[in-house]
Structures are given as structure tokens and as C-alpha cells.
Amino acid sequence: MKSDIVPIMQATISGELEKIGLEWFSQASVCVVMASGGYPGHYDRGKGNGGIGFIKKSRRYTCLSCWY
């Protein structure tokens, strides 16, 4: 994304996201977020991260996309 994220977040908070123009780079990107089991509810803290090799064994994948 070429656009500065701060004005986007401010517009999201104020409910005026439709007034923001977004600019995008043409290249692809990937964002991976890892969280402890149970998140965002009760979850264990201070656990180590063994990398993403476990994902091949996992039966559950979560994908969230938001389009405006």
C-alpha cells in the first residue's frame, strides 16, 4: 500500500473511511499474523514460536480480507 496508514486508521476510528483515497503498489504482498490459541479471548502468554512449519499439519486456517 502506498498510502500512509495513520490517516486510514484515523478515518476508520472516526467512521469516515469512505472519504479516504487509497493508493496501492502493483507488487504483491503477504502478511502473516500468528497468535496464541484462544486469542482474542483468554490465551496463554509467554509461549515460544517454533516457526510456521506446523501449518502443514494444521487442519485450521484463518483468512481475513477487508475490501473497502
Image (spheres, helix red, strand yellow):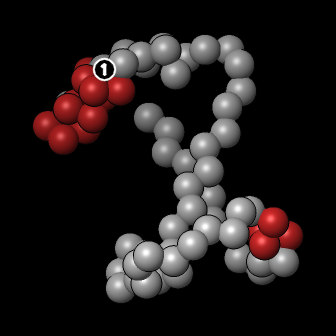
Of 67 and 24, the residue lying toward us: 24
Q: Provide residue 23's location: percent of width, then percent of height.
A: 48, 14
Of 65 and 46, the residue lying toward us: 46
Q: Is residue 49 left or right of residue 42?
A: right
Q: Provide residue 9's location: percent of width, then percent of height.
A: 27, 34
Query: What residue does disc 1 label?
Result: 20
Q: Provide residue 65's location: percent of width, then percent of height.
A: 55, 48
Quarter of the image for the C terminus: give it: top left
Examine the image and state in which quarter residue 44 appears. bottom left
> Where is 60 relative to 29, above or below?
below
> Where is 53 relative to 59, above or below?
above
> Where is 42 relative to 16, above or below?
below
> Where is 4 relative to 57, above or below?
above
The reply to whether residue 15 is visible in this rendering is no
Mark 1 neighbour density, 10 Å: few (under 14) some (14–19) many (20 or more): few
Q: Which residue is depicted at the point 28% across and 27% down?
A: 6
Q: Which residue is depicted at the point 74% across and 62% down?
A: 52
Instruction: Report the amino acid beneath label 1.
Output: Ile
